[in-house]
Amino acid sequence: MFGNIKNASGENLDYTFHDGDTTQKIVVLGHGVTGNKDRPFLVELAKNLSKSGIPTLRFSFSGNGDSDGEFTESTISKEIGDLASVLDVLENHTVCYIGHSMGGAVGVLSASQNDRIKLLVSLAGMVDTKAFAQREFGDVTPDEGFMWDEPSCPLSQVYMDDLAKIDTVVDYASKISVPWLLVHGSEDDVVPIEDSQNIYAQANEPKELFTIEDANHVFSDDSLNPMVEKVVNWIKNQFALIS
């Protein structure tokens, strides 16, 4: 529907579009580190949004999935540019951005400086980026080792430097003025729920923090339906308030 979407480097961004009842409002789904647009919980969320009449576009950041680019260059800073390129294509739409994990940090930084995002949803959003990098990969040698021992996900110095430079996105919360839903699982062992709690405390109204008991980082098993139901209903209600 939207043709080829390219980022500022000319790299194609792979996406899947789910149709809906409106042509003016749309949800954009962004994944986390080592992920892509086809993560099962993102696909399920997109299908349910579409079923509820809300068009949804899920895409893979450059260097991930079937998008062009190198995984070793996939940083929060570059992904902000990727998202901006998607938003350029959707300039005539009212956009809700949903970001999971590192894609959540991309959402915070983007929404704080890009007024094309009218609604924001953070799913287990990464907040303290430097702490995350050290906690998860502090014992891995950049440009030699891998993320979580996954050979397809080499750990780059560029990635580590970017997360260290950003340090935390908590101070950007006060710069976001759009309605914001944060969803986090109590048993998330990748991004602790305290990340969402801390940035929620700094966020402006209207805001909501929805905690799912016993949910992990990717909302698997019994936590999938509560996450999907909450997000779909929240977006439906918020879009209804926007003319």
Image (cartoon, grey):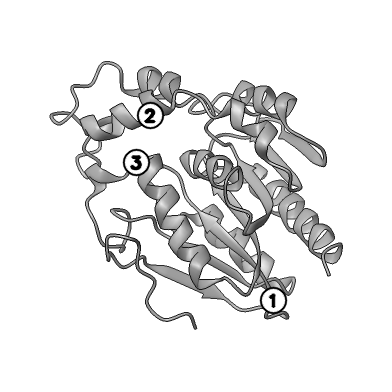
Q: What residue type is labelled 1?
A: Gln
Q: Is residue 134 above or below residue 151?
A: above
Upstream in sequence: badge 1 or badge 3: 1
Q: Residue 18: image x %, image y %? A: 57, 74
Q: Residue at x 44, y 48 (%)?
A: 80
Up-down: is 120 above or below 182? Answer: below
Q: Are marks 2 and 3 in contact (CB under 8 Å)?
A: yes
Circle 1 crowding by C-alpha within 10 Å: few under 14, some 14–19, many from 20: few
**Amino acid type assigned to the residue bearing label 2 in the image:** Leu
Q: In this view, does 73 lie to the left or right of 197?
A: left
100 w.r.t. 1: above or below: above
Residue 109 percent coordinates (x, y): 54, 40
Element at badge 2?
helix
Are the residues tagged 1 and 2 within 8 Å (C-beta)? no
Left or right: where does residue 216 sit relative to residue 52? left
Q: On the image, numbered disc 2 is attached to which residue?
A: 163
Mark 1 and mark 2: Cα distance apart in space: 35 Å
In terms of sequence position, does the residue under pointer 2 or pointer 3 come before the other? 3
Give residue 14's quadrant in the image.
bottom left
59 and 172: which one is in front?
Answer: 172
Type of residue at label 3? Thr
In the picture of the structure, the residue carrying the numbered disc 1 is 24
Q: Position of residue 95 (x, y in %)?
A: 64, 63
Q: Rounded to the nearest whole Å, what is the CA distance between mark 2 and mark 3?
A: 8 Å
Marker disc for residue 75: 3
Residue 48 location, x and y as percent? 67, 65
The residue at the far left in this view is 144
Please rate how many residues cluster around mark 3, counting C-alpha atoms within 10 Å: few if below 14, some from 14 to 19, many from 20: many
Name which residue lies at 50% across and 43% down.
Answer: 106
The residue positioned 25% from the left and 44% from the top of the image is 73
Residue 121 in the figure: left or right of residue 63: right
